[in-house]
Image (tube, rainbow, N blue to C red):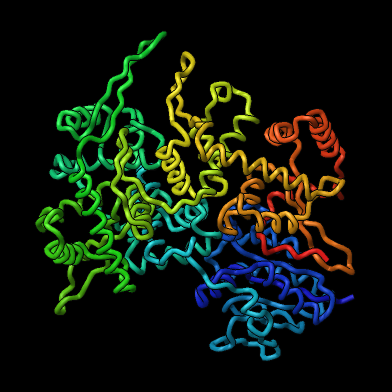
Amino acid sequence: MAGVAIFVDYENLTFVLQRREYCRLRHQKIGEALLQYARQFGAIEQATMWAEWDRFQSNKRHEQSAQAILTALGFDCLYLLRPSDRGYTEQAILKKVQPRLNDLKQIILVSGDYTFPELLSQIDIPTSLVLLSKEGAFVANEEVDVVEFADVVDSDEVLSPLQTPHGMEPAAFYIWMQRVLQEELRRRSWHGMSFHMLARLLVERNLCEEDVEAQFYINQAVREGFLERSETELPTGRRILLKPTIVERANDPVWSFDEEFRWAQLIWALEMILSRNPWWEYVTFSRLREELEKWSLVTGSDELQQMVEEAVEKGIYKLNVEEGGPPLFRKKYKYTLGDVGEMREKFRELPLLILQTMRGLLELHPHWHGVSFSKLLDELDERVRHAEQKIWVDRQRLKDWCNFLVAIGFLHAFRGRPRVVDGELRDPPTLLRIVPEHPWLQHLGKITEEESVVPEEEVHDDDDLGPKKDFTLRRLDYYRLIVVIEHYLHISNNDAVVAGWMPMSTLFHVMGRSLERSFCNAVVRSAREKGIIEIRTHDPRPGQHPARGAHLELDHPDAVAARKRVLRLLDIIQSVQDRNGVAELYTLEARLREDPFFGEEEDERLGWIELMREENLILVRPHTGTEDEGTTRYLCTLNFRDRYVLALLERLYPSSKGSFASLAAASEADEKNTTEEDIDLDASKSQPYNPSDYSKPN
């Protein structure tokens, strides 16, 4: 029985389509639409596509590539061996059609703008030619039905507009592309990279999904001047190579030996380390070296050692040498910041001024790819003259600071497009752009964000951890810290628990599951100042590094109050639960709303349920009612498998000590016998909980 054959020049179709629409293709939708169109003429006997499929290979699993998707739909996806030969697909179709002319009643040809002239002149079978546009398409055979691609495929379904990764601005994405290419060229010691290799590199770095998408962005970067093309002779012939238009700094600029920039690097490094680890009282030399190797101009350990020694002599660093104990008796060198308040403020104000100036210019001129060096200096000079005297610097010093920030990667310098001024072609200007991934820029962003929300309170601790931020903390935040430490001391079994302390790294990891890191830092610092916890350094075993831990002051009023509230909450849950040990969450919240013992405000009272749930002390799970009820209720149970819960219950009910142990054993047995149809309490814990989500019981 005669059938239908559909042949698709997918290489030409996608090339022309993306060049016109600047879009991302949905291969699944395209394949389904073409097959649906072919079935209108009868049963499909043959469906074949040709393309250079490596260009459509994503960096994900092979099952998600275009070739795998279209093959699963029923297409025979063949490789286009000569992509530059436009007639290769035509000859391949002729070889497949000629032996089966008597078995086909309809042929469908799909392409972007190629009309298959030789093929259409040799066959007399009814043929449909699908092109992107009929305009300008010359078909010698008038009996051929020419159809536009938009009439076969819905463009809104198969095409999605291209978007830069992570919602970045185009200029920022092109600069990211420059840095990726520069890094790869340095690693390989190459002078340039071919078009296709760069496209594959962008896909491997997860900057683009497919090679065809990466090639579009590469062409745009070349047009905008972020990449430049150069021809070179290779053994395989003449090739076009791409390289970034980045302005390289000199190997040893004179200003890199300026003392001010040396001290800026040392102060920034120590400040960032202590900011990321607020419980540290000092920094070792190895930590300084690890930090500075990421972004500074320090070339080796010897140079850094010399800089640190000079900083100690000038009072920028304070050095405390601690004698080591057996068996190695190794000395420990502890570095902290000295009395450098004015210097640190200047080193913070100048980069912040440059950052704000560049952002203001780019917001005022959104079509700019970057700020020219001369324009930035003019704006900075104008702003500095109107600023306070403490950060006043001349134009030459501003230029040195900009060069320094370019050298450490804070700013990105590249060549712009050539300009025509007064009829003359001028050299391309040097443009600057902010690098958001730089560690010091992220540190400045945190400082400005905190200062914009909360006023800074200049309070210096004995260990000189820097200025404290007066976060608005609730009493419940301190209670959370107390419960976290007590919970850890009951469920863990290690040397720290025996000594009665919780490692700082573990504390921040547990609290960071529900709070931001900066807020955790504020809670720990404030609790330390109030005397709720004490941070100590514990002597390690031989061969181990000393550890920092948080000791909970059990006699502190807040610690006593937190323990009483936890016991009171467990008592309420026990009183409202049914004979199966399950309590209605609505009933529990109603009790807490009416109980002033848990706080003055309603949010603080209800916050205790969320606190206990995050610590896995109570389990909350949804329960769907019958069809007649049509409501979902939330049920609350105690986690009897937690040793902290058992210890609290035994303290609350001393006479029922043995019964709680049997409940824990029964709970473990139920967990082992749980089937797939049963409700997993641990899985329900991961569901987001909102007090307004549940409905009142009927």
Q: Across the whole image, how many numbered discs are drawn on residues?
A: 0
**Residue sitting at the far top:** 327
Q: Position of residue 678 (x, y in %)?
A: 85, 48
254 on left or right of 555: left
Which residue is nearer to you in this view: 696 or 615? 696
In the foreground, 499 or 557: 557
Point out residue 310 in the picture as x, y percentages from the top left corner: 17, 30
**Nearer-the-camera pick, 561 or 260:** 561
Residue 148 percent location from the top left of the image:
63, 85
At a point 22% along the width and 48% down the height, the residue shown is: 345
Quadrant including the N terminus? bottom right
What residue is at 62 percent from the left and 44 percent from the top? 565
In the picture, measured across the screen, residue 353 lies left or right of residue 230, that is: left
Residue 639 lies, with reference to residue 474, above or below; the image says above
Q: Is residue 241 visible?
A: no
Q: Using the image as rendered, state which of residue 261 and residue 447 is in the foreground.
A: 447
Position of residue 35 relative to residue 129, above or below, is above
> Would you say residue 192 is visible in this rendering?
yes
* Residue 655 shown left or right of residue 454 in the figure: right
Q: Residue at x 66, y 88 (%)?
A: 141
Q: Which residue is painted at 56% across and 69% down in the image?
A: 24
Residue 68 is drawn in which quadrant?
A: bottom right
**Residue 62 position in % (x across, y down):** 66, 52
Q: Is residue 548 above or below residue 515?
A: above
Left or right of 427? Residue 83 is: right
